[in-house]
């Protein structure tokens, strides 16, 4: 129905995540505002002056959220966003959304004693950009460690960036305030198992204390890097 704006909708199996993950491609060129009512939502006020790319990615994320929430029994749920820009998931549901230039992802699970979920998709940074941006993403020590690895620095820096954004999205619903890329460090990478570990360098809440470690999963697909953290 949404083609050519939205194509390639699929449900992903990613590591052993017990929830649902949907992914699709979207085309900003094919996006029209008329697609909003087709997804059953109004164009939100905060997007009225947004560029088409922003409207398109927002709608693609909401379209996916409808698919996965429907599977969990929340049919036709309109996913609004809070003042902090975080999505307002239905009671008892944890979820996360991400998009890059032409792909969107949405993951959800029933909380039932489980914690949060963070998911993030990034297009691999160009090497020049990685050299310009690394100090905002990793410490000098993390940077030195990344440079010692056999993989390209720009690819690994994109992975760490994405991993930290996934951590932020996973923890934000508990922590409820901003924390920085340098408040966590990347401590382990396992290319065979496609896993990584991050450690908090700051106490954010009594549960999210300094030294707490989080395992995450990643996927490299051409120039697309996807990470996920759930706990
Ligand atoms: C919020 C943030 C993580 C979003 O990441 P991004 O790469 O810019 O964009 P993505 O496409 O991956 O994700 C955007 C989605 O994140 C979600 N999001 C926004 N704010 C959020 C928050 N506070 N908590 C959880 N999810 C949030 C939204 O669903 C948003 O999409 P939507 O506006 O279309 O609904 C990022 O902009 C940010 O502020 N990062 C700084 C904080 C950080 O990452 N610290 C690292 C700590 S180790």
Image (cartoon, rainbow, N blue to C red):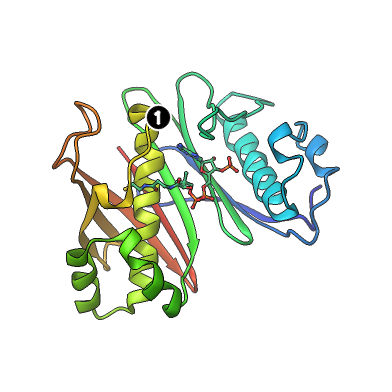
- Which residue is outermost to the right? 34
In the image, is residue 162 above or below residue 72?
below
In the image, is residue 41 above or below residue 222?
above
Q: Residue at 34% across / 67% down in the picture?
A: 134
- Which residue is outermost to the left? 211
Q: Name the residue under label 1.
A: 173
Q: Is residue 46 left or right of residue 142?
A: right
In the image, is residue 90 above or below residue 53?
above
Q: Residue at 54% across / 27% down in the picture?
A: 88
**Crowd tier of the residue under label 1, counting other residues whose Cα lies within 10 Å: few below 14, some 14–19, many 20 or above:** some
Q: Position of residue 174 (x, y in %)?
A: 34, 27
Q: Position of residue 18 (x, y in %)?
A: 39, 38
184 or 99, nearer to the observer: 184
Where disc 1 sits, the SS reads: helix
66 or 43, nearer to the observer: 43
30 or 22, nearer to the observer: 30
**Quadrant the C terminus occupies:** top left
Q: Position of residue 114 (x, y in %)?
A: 32, 29
């Amino acid at each position: 129905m949404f083609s050519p704006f939205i194509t390639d909708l699929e449900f992903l199996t990613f590591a052993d995540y017990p929830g649902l993950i949907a992914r699709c491609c979207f085309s900003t060129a094919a996006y029209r505002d008329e697609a909003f009512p087709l997804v059953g939502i109004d164009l939100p006020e905060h997007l009225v002056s947004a560029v088409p790319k922003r409207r398109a990615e927002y709608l693609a994320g909401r379209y996916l959220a409808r698919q996965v929430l429907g599977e969990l029994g929340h049919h036709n749920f309109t996913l609004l966003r809070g003042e902090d820009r975080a999505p307002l998931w239905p009671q008892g549901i944890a979820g996360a959304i991400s998009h890059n230039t032409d792909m969107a992802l949405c993951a959800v699970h029933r909380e039932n004693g489980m914690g949060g979920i963070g998911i993030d998709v990034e297009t691999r940074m160009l090497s020049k950009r990685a050299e310009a941006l690394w100090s905002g993403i990793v410490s000098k020590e993390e940077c030195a460690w990344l440079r010692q690895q056999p993989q390209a620095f720009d690819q690994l820096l994109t992975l760490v960036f994405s991993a930290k954004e996934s951590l932020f999205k996973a923890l934000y619903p508990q922590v409820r305030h901003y924390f920085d890329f340098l408040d966590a460090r990347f401590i382990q990478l396992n290319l065979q198992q496609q896993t990584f570990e991050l450690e908090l360098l700051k106490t954010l809440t009594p549960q999210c204390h300094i030294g707490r470690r989080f395992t995450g999963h990643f996927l490299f697909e051409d120039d697309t890097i996807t990470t996920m953290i759930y706990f």
